[in-house]
Image (cartoon, grey):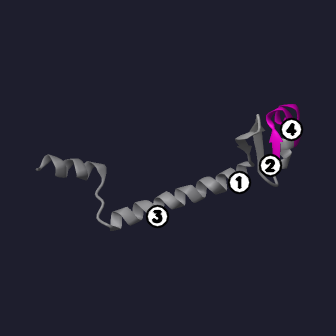
Amino acid sequence: MTITATEAKNHFGEYLEKTMADPVFIQKTGRPVAVMLSVKEYERLTGLEDAYWAQKALAAEKSGYVGKKESKELLNTR
């Protein structure tokens, strides 16, 4: 669902309830500016992001990445 910023302002409570089912996209002067979504959906998305970055960190570690402290020590020994 997409609404204008004016609609969001005038009917905030109504659209807040609608976020329980689907995100509500908000436009201002015809362009998208924000999205309202439920806490449950927000937590799901941040969980996915956390899992993604955890996988990237594991892959980096397996490929030989050393941490910040170890990198600094290696640079100082040369």
The residue carrying mark 3 is 55
Q: Which of the labelled discs sits on residue 41, or is there none? A: 1
Q: Is 11 in the magenta?
A: yes
The amino acid beneath tag 3 is Gln
The residue carrying mark 4 is 13
Q: CA distance from mark 1 to mark 4?
A: 18 Å
Marks 2,1: beta carbons within 8 A? yes
Task: Give, as a single range, the part of the protein colored magenta.
Answer: 1-14
Mark 1 or 4, nearer chain start = 4
The amino acid beneath tag 1 is Glu
The amino acid beneath tag 4 is Gly
Q: Label 3's element?
A: helix
Horizontal and vertical percent for residue 4?
Answer: 82, 38
Q: Which of the labelled discs sits on residue 19, or is there none? A: 2
Residue at coordinates 46% horizontally, 64% vertically from top-left?
Answer: 55
Residue at coordinates 17% horizontally, 49% vertically from top-left?
Answer: 75
The amino acid beneath tag 2 is Thr
Mark 2 or 1, nearer chain start = 2
Horizontal and vertical percent for residue 70?
Answer: 24, 52
Marks 4,2: beta carbons within 8 A? no
Q: Label 1's element?
A: helix
Closer to us: 31 or 53:
31
Please say if 29 is above or below 2.
above
Horizontal and vertical percent for residue 23?
Answer: 77, 50
